[in-house]
Amino acid sequence: MNKKTLFESLQQQGITRRGFMKYCTALTSLMALPPSMIPMVANALETAKRPSVIWLSFQECTGCAESLLRSHSPTVEGLIFDHISLDYQHTLQVAAGDAAEHAREQAMKEHHGKYLVVVDGSIPLADPGYSTIAGISNLDMLNETIEGAAAVVAVGTCSAFGGLPQAAPNPTGAVSVSSLVKDKPVINVPGCPPIPTVITGVLAHYLTFGSIPELDNLGRPKVFYGQSIHDRCYRRPFYDKGLFAETFDDEGAKKGWCLYRLGCKGPMTYNACATLKWNQQTSWPVESGHGCLGCSEPNFWDAGSFYKALSIPDGDYAKAAGYAVAAGVAVGAAAGFANQKNKANAVSQHTKVTVDDFGENKDK
Amino acid sequence: MISDSLADINVHVENLHHDFETGNLHSILSEIKFALEQLLQHKKTHSIDLRAMPWSPGEEKKLEQYLGKGEIQIEMDALGKSHFYESKYSGIWIVTHYNPEGEVIGKLIEISYMPDMIFTREEDVKDSLERLQQL
């Protein structure tokens, strides 16, 4: 860890106490904590040390890193990145070859037991030759690097759950980080890509409190993945009233009705898109008129067509909507269970998107 | 025929009717009312993070219109601008923090006699005195 505290570092940059408090306010919001936590965050940051981060990229498309780096700058995210020591990221660092690997080894040695490892991408087990860095297989590099790590952050669905590389027939034998790492805390930050503020929010939590946030049963931080897209969706009142868009250009679509019948996976997807949104909080898929793809859930690539409606208990939408008004979340939960089964079937059958999934050809 | 302006392209953009409400407006107003009672009875301040709420397009604007603008507006310049203004209901402040690029990085409703960030801290007063004494 760097000896300077974050507050001292900010002060040296000419940032005043009010600026620091503003930073803490934005950071608290970023971590999805209530504003009543701002004084605690400020207190923790006044003494927080700069942690070392080693970022490993395996079988991935660099979309997760792009999501973070292209978000917007300089903002809270930018400030956080100024205050962690990113000691290895082979796409971004200037050093290459031996020098780059030396940087990683040196960070591991100097910060043994205290550094964070961020991983994006899945790990191929069928043949290590599918993905190597400096001649080192992904599996060997992961095992070597996590040995002295305090925790591992699996960024993106590939790293958290296998993602696209693991989609059937999974030619590389791709697996997730958590299926290999059993003796260190693993924080899954899925999404294809994850929301940049969620990535930094998790890093900020570690920077601020020196601990990992509370996780759900899939290892995801509850503050960001604790509620379904459906439950926080601003179009939810239309679902409750049984008002659905049937095609992408009908009257319902123009009036902003629920996209459930157009294949929205919101009811079975846990993520923070509905509140944090994308592109400087401009919008998010559902607000732009497209259903949620469920990208932060395991096996989402193999879970059937993005445009096929999830089923609800009896297939009668008007009746189900009536139940929904009466029972609220219960119907959503029942639909969730029904659809988990459908998803499992789709995965085993590896169903594909066809023209019948779209518009008026769509199976009603 | 070659078009030389966008107006020549026969595309009609329809205004979408997304002016419905999620119901969050009513919940927030109830929370504000309760917080004002707490402020009066126990001097307890409260903040609501507006960016943590799922809003329908335009709904947040409706809340601002409902609360209106009161007599006081304050601008702060630290890590980008911040705007504080009291609503037409005294004790309810709308606070917006921007980064140096002018993008919103925080938006809150504060229920207090004065937003906490406005007050000058004792440490800063001591620091000012030290610097003045060195002149």
Image (cartoon, rainbow, N blue to C red):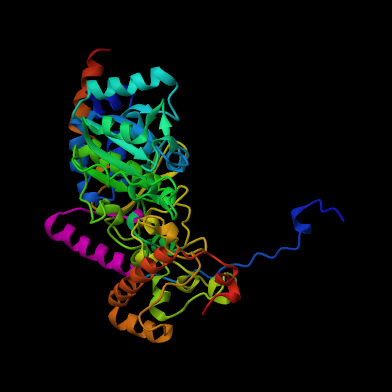
Is residue B26 shown in magenta? yes
User: Magenta residues?
Assistant: B24-51
Percent of width and height locating residue B10: 75, 63
**Going 40% across and 66% down the picture, which residue do you hit?**
A234
Whether A224 is drawn above or below A110: the answer is below
The residue lying furthest to the right in this view is: B1
Chief secondary structure of the magenta span?
helix
Quarter assignment of residue B131: top left
Is residue B20 shown in magenta? no
| A288, B118: nearer the viewer | A288
| B103, A105: nearer the viewer | A105
**Going 26% across and 45% down the picture, which residue do you hit?**
A187
How many marks do you count on the picture? Answer: 0
The answer to whether any part of residue A255 appears in the image is yes
| A96, A275: nearer the viewer | A96
| A6, A298: nearer the viewer | A298
Q: Is residue A213 left or right of residue A305?
A: left
Percent of width and height locating residue B28: 30, 64
The answer to whether any part of residue B23 appears in the image is no
Q: Is residue B63 left or right of residue A4?
A: right
On-image quarter of the C terminus of chain B: top left
Percent of width and height locating residue A282: 48, 52
